Amino acid sequence: MYSKKRIAVLISGRGSNLKSLIAACKDPSYPAEIEVVISNNPDAGGLDIARHERIHTHVIDHQPFGNDRKAHERQIDATLQAHNVSTVCLAGYMRLLTPFLISNWKGKMLNIHPSLLPLFPGLHTHRKALKAGMKVHGCTVHLVTEEVDAGPILGQAVIPILPNDTEETLADRLLEQEHLLYPRVLKNFIEQESPNPTIDALING
Ligand code: GRF
């Protein structure tokens, strides 16, 4: 028996990866629970998913902060601290982060990226994979470091690229794998990071 780690999920959009993490966390044996969901986009569909599950949500819109990215991140950081989370999962969070937030959560912030990193960092990954003539494509969960989409790789899933694939069909098939990969990698990450056995587990081995 392990106590659950409190995690935060940062989103900007529809939130399908958030949904897969929520589903995983419902298993009593899963080592994490989602304490808070933060979106920089007030219209993110993922907010409704979280609200429906009665998870705390915070909209921290970047627009009023203009170019002051750090001020925006200070508010995000304060919210993460207030919720006492141990791990932050970026799941379709579409803002580039500054060294301020990245260094505060060093080794504790994960991201999912829709390519086999280090191939195709940045946007339009499905288009880039097709254009490069790749026969396989995939997704990566990695630790967030200052260089975009370049932190240590924690896990990857691979799919074939089929002859008639378009950006859309590829994205759809890959998304199914993202939904399996992120919960699995998060579980491994948490369990290796700190097993934190309860007294029961210690007594019963
Ligand atoms: C996913 O493809 C993820 O890999 C990328 O952004 C997309 C987010 O989708 N970082 P969703 O909001 O989780 O549905």
Image (cartoon, rainbow, N blue to C red):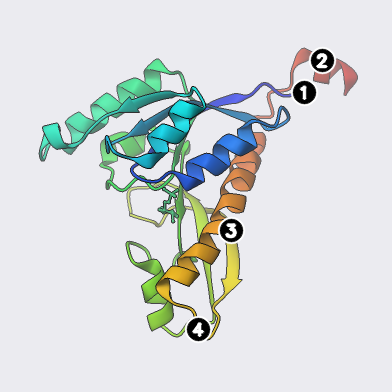
Q: Amino acid at mark 1?
A: Met
Which residue does the numbered mark 3 point to in the structure image?
177
Expressed as whole percent of the image width and height from the top left, the position of residue 146 reads 33, 48
Instruction: Please tell me which residue lies in front, 50 or 151.
Output: 50
Q: CA distance from mark 1 to mark 3?
A: 28 Å
Which residue does the numbered mark 2 point to in the structure image?
200
Which SS class for mark 4? loop
Instruction: Give yes or no for contact between labels 1 and 2 (Cβ–Cβ under 8 Å).
Output: yes
Which SS class for mark 1? loop
* Residue visible at 58% across and 58% down in the picture: 177
Which residue does the numbered mark 4 point to in the structure image?
164
Q: Is residue 126 left or right of residue 26?
A: left
Which residue does the numbered mark 1 point to in the structure image?
1
Expressed as whole percent of the image width and height from the top left, the position of residue 113 reads 44, 56
Q: CA distance from mark 4 to mark 2?
A: 54 Å
Q: Which mark is residue 116?
A: none
